[in-house]
Image (spheres, coloured by chain):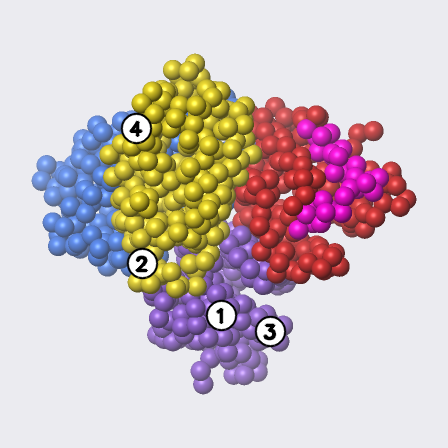
Chain colours: A blue, B yellow, C red, D purple
Amino acid sequence: MTGAPYGAAFTQWRAGCPDAWHAYTHHAFVEGLRDGSLPRPAFLHYLVQDYVFLVHFARAWSLAVVKAETLDEMKICAGTVNALVNHEMALHVQTCAGEGINEAALYAACEEVENLAYTRYVMDAGLQGDFLDLMAALAPCCFGYGEIGLRLARSAAPDTPHRAWIDTYADDGYQSVMTSVGQMIDGAISRRLGPDPVRAPRWAHLQNRFSTATRLEIGFWDMGLRGS
Amino acid sequence: MTGAPYGAAFTQWRAGCPDAWHAYTHHAFVEGLRDGSLPRPAFLHYLVQDYVFLVHFARAWSLAVVKAETLDEMKICAGTVNALVNHEMALHVQTCAGEGINEAALYAACEEVENLAYTRYVMDAGLQGDFLDLMAALAPCCFGYGEIGLRLARSAAPDTPHRAWIDTYADDGYQSVMTSVGQMIDGAISRRLGPDPVRAPRWAHLQNRFSTATRLEIGFWDMGLRGS
Amino acid sequence: MTGAPYGAAFTQWRAGCPDAWHAYTHHAFVEGLRDGSLPRPAFLHYLVQDYVFLVHFARAWSLAVVKAETLDEMKICAGTVNALVNHEMALHVQTCAGEGINEAALYAACEEVENLAYTRYVMDAGLQGDFLDLMAALAPCCFGYGEIGLRLARSAAPDTPHRAWIDTYADDGYQSVMTSVGQMIDGAISRRLGPDPVRAPRWAHLQNRFSTATRLEIGFWDMGLRGS
Amino acid sequence: MTGAPYGAAFTQWRAGCPDAWHAYTHHAFVEGLRDGSLPRPAFLHYLVQDYVFLVHFARAWSLAVVKAETLDEMKICAGTVNALVNHEMALHVQTCAGEGINEAALYAACEEVENLAYTRYVMDAGLQGDFLDLMAALAPCCFGYGEIGLRLARSAAPDTPHRAWIDTYADDGYQSVMTSVGQMIDGAISRRLGPDPVRAPRWAHLQNRFSTATRLEIGFWDMGLRGS
């Protein structure tokens, strides 16, 4: 099998950095979620950092609304921001509350260097470049989690304690948002780079954005495993 | 009476530019909406430009999410972006469709200089300054329309053809969002400038942002009256 | 004759909006500089607004350094910022001082709506788009003043009191900077859009940036003529 | 002794994170420069990464011009950008060329995660906040290198091979620029926060910017020591 079907650009970008993509989506952290062997402190450390990540990820999708050039781009990005800020972060808060970590503590958590590097790289991709630069940097997280969710939903140990995490991303709702985001990105690329974007001079640059963000995802899992 | 109650900062800012505020909220264009004397071409010209305005206004509220520093700020701003992009713009599109103007035409309309000046000034207030600079530049539109809506709902001619426009802003939903936005702004100011913000060195600068945006609102009505 | 030779992109963009370009570069304000008939109050009004313009123009060229993606782009843009802030603005200040207007007064001058519209449109072109969007919006001012300077140096009335203004832009130094900027822009375009940029899907968008900025230049001269 | 005298804000910020400041300015990497024990591969690795750092540092100082609100702020920041891009980077290139590393290779070097984290954090401090947020994030690099340069110039082993590096930052030119930057920052703070800025509500936030950037400086030296 060849990974999740979130559109042409994603398929191309993923094929452009196969080793990094595999290292990200089959990371020991992910395998620990799948077979249930992930140490609890590692999971909690990840959860807290991931909340801070979501804050900046929502900021980055907001920057995408600032940079959008069509109604369709604006609508998808604005919907994503709202889903992140007013729904997904709330879910995260609930999970963390169950572990005795309250929202203010989450918001104020000290960011690890891997978290800073990833989120601020994405923000700066948007400031330095255009809408496509930002999309290429946002794509690995969105689509990678979708792909991991799908794979783990099929293959996770029945007794893994991380079923709720897996379901969040395997969920039809998440998957259908990813399909819309993939279509929107394909449209955005085609409007700016034409029908054969891979031959456009900017393609290598966009691939580099995607590959760098994928590399930073690997670092994020490493950080999770390292624990606090 | 002294205008709509959207919080302490707004009350202060409005009192800081009374002539401009009156010229904006009691502009001949507004009086034309109230008594029904506004020429139809002026209203249509305004509607089209206002749609383009909303696009950039939504971009500016998205920039506010980028610049927010607390969860509460993020949530209010993200909700506003979503309301603008996925609801208010749709209403506008409906109204315009009733006049035979479709959405693509709206999005592509040639922006008048008054529209460019206002919307890009607000965006740049956000890029140059911090969250408060952006809020001070966004406030006149939000709160001014709320205040105009309330006044016209009480005083409009029974047969004005602009009842729907008036109701949009006099509406409890709009008013309650404005109350939340006002509270959020007061909180944002207090967190950054302390309990006596009017004495903070930055206050004159923020007042200048508000006054300039108010001046640009007057220009926007002038443009509407001028017709296309 | 075909205008000043500042590179392929400029030649193309200028040809893409011939009427607006002519209205800008042969505006009554320009003709008044040429034959000496420009009323003094109009010139002074323009000078003060142009100083405020330079402040934001320098900010826009700084944003270009933020958005640059090669060393060459960074070097040219950083040199331009420094020339604007630490030299050209000083010249302007000198001229204004000769008219009894000091620098603080200049910096604090109330911006006319045409000035706000133009400068903030350019800033936002940079925030919304990429380096090319910003270059297309910056080009009309840079190259148009160069072209006007050259034409007026050849054709101005011997007794026009505006010889110093004309010389500023006809000057070899200014012309040679414009040649470098033109080459840099051509390189930047070729790196991003390939050898046949006019056929790239983004070209119409860039032309629109250039045409809009040209239209805003016309408004700037109108404002000058209107006086304070 | 109490460190280098670059103004009141710096003195305060440094005192606000004494352990991190000491860990940064007396890092094993720095001691290796001082006594000459730093392994050559570590120094070369650092040099290449530092070049990439300078690129983004110049972008951040350019963002400061975008965000400046007075002439003095603009002039100092624009001069710094120009010094970085058109002089300091050239020196760096020369040093690297002596080691057989050319400029294109430098510009294209793969950024380490510590480098990404630091530079993009600074950029985003500017995008999210105002001029002061950006200054607080830029200060540790500027002033820390000045302080290290001064200390090492007095105490370095006579035969350390890193005398040229030390001189770059101990140099009167560098020191005098740092004094100007420190004065400019003090003025910028006083204009925005008043005569007693440490009691302003935003002070803790600015201290956090400075402390975070200092922490990221420590990571940068760690990365240098680790080698490529």
Disc 3/disc 4 C-alpha distance (Å): 63 Å
Q: Nearer the viewer, residue D227 or C5?
A: C5
Q: Quadrant of residue D160?
A: bottom right
Above or below residue D201? Residue B3 is above
- Residue type at numbered disc 4: Asp
Which residue is disc 4 drawn over?
Answer: B167
Disc 3/disc 2 C-alpha distance (Å): 38 Å
Q: Secondary structure at mark 4?
A: helix
Q: Which mark is residue B190?
A: 2
Residue at figure coordinates x 73%, y 29% from the top left: C22
Disc 4/disc 2 C-alpha distance (Å): 33 Å
The spot of residue D107 in percent (x, y) is: 56, 51
- Residue type at numbered disc 1: Asp
Which residue is disc 1 drawn over?
Answer: D186
In the image, residue B217 lies in the stretch drawn in magenta? no
Q: Nearer the viewer, residue B118 or C195?
A: B118
Which residue is disc 3 drawn over?
Answer: D176
Q: Can marks 1 and 4 be said to lie on one chain?
A: no
Residue mark closest to the camera, 1 vs 4:
4
Q: Quadrant of the C terminus of chain B?
A: top right
Q: Secondary structure at mark 2?
A: helix
Which range of residues does the magenta coloring cover?
A: C20-48
Q: Secondary structure at mark 3?
A: helix
Q: Residues within 10 Å of mark 4 (few under 14, many from 20)?
A: some
Residue mark closest to the camera, 1 vs 2:
2
Q: Chain of mark 4?
A: B
The spot of residue A132 in percent (x, y) is: 46, 35
Q: Is residue A23 left or right of residue B217?
A: left
Residue at figure coordinates x 18%, y 33% from the top left: A153
Q: Secondary structure at mark 1?
A: helix
